[in-house]
Amino acid sequence: MYSIRRIVPAALVIIAFSAGWFARTTAQQNAPVPMITYFSHDKVDASFAKAIATDGSRIMFTRKDSQGRSFSVHTNSRTKSDEGQPHSHQGWTAIVVIVSGAATFVTPGAPASAPAAKAAAMDDLGGQPIGSGETHRIGKGDVIIIPPGVPHIYKNVEEPFHYIVVETPL
């Protein structure tokens, strides 16, 4: 037969576990709905104007996710005289959306070999990998996803060259 000394501690553990589970479930059900953030085209245009008036980039929005990682949205403007330097982003992926104008997107380095280039076929959704040493003419409506540490540069800019960068955590 089970003694009370064994039953009571086991019952207390079960009760404590159940209370914790109930509290967690209730908290999840009552969690506030995250706010949606909206920027009108006037606000976006104003952010591009501020980017032009400063160093060419303006943080329009930034927030931390539930794990404390930051993500942000930048508006960027480049002119013919501001083609920039080869650079890469450390610790985040850039999702670039071209809003207006055009430029030549260059990934410095030695070009991939022919067999490797053939292997870089389109993915299931139509995205095409870009390797080192390649250039692509980009313009309004194009989207580029740049992983951390990948050098790139914009050249041969056609104004107004405006693009939005969504900075996403790893």
Image: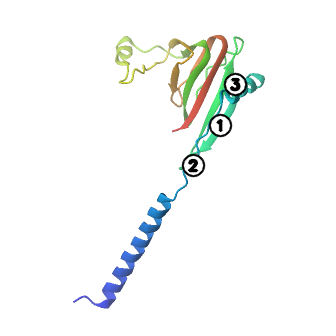
The residue at 60%/12% (across/down) is 102
Image position, residue 164 (x, y; %): 61, 26
Q: CA distance from mark 2 to mark 3?
A: 29 Å
Q: Residues within 10 Å of mark 2 (few under 14, many from 20)?
A: few
Q: Which residue is mark 3?
A: 45
Q: Name the colouring of the figure.
A: rainbow
Residue type marked 1: Phe
Image: 121 above or below 158: below
Q: Which residue is mark 1?
A: 61
Residue type marked 2: Gly
Quadrant in which the N terminus appears: bottom left
- Secondary structure beneath dot 2 equals loop
The residue at 52%/56% (across/down) is 31
Image position, residue 68 (x, y; %): 57, 49
Residue type marked 3: Asp
Q: Residues within 10 Å of mark 1 (few under 14, many from 20)?
A: few
Name the residue nearer the viewer: 76 or 44.
44
Name the residue nearer the viewer: 16 or 85.
16
Q: Sequence order check: which comes first, mark 2 or mark 1? A: 1
Residue sitting at the far right? 53
Q: Which residue is mark 2?
A: 68
Image: 33 above or below 51: below
Mark 2 or 1: in front is 1
Q: Sequence order check: which comes first, mark 2 or mark 3? A: 3
Which labelled disc corresponds to residue 117?
Answer: none
Q: CA distance from mark 3 to mark 1?
A: 14 Å
Residue sitting at the far left? 1
Q: Is residue 17 left or right of residue 104?
A: left
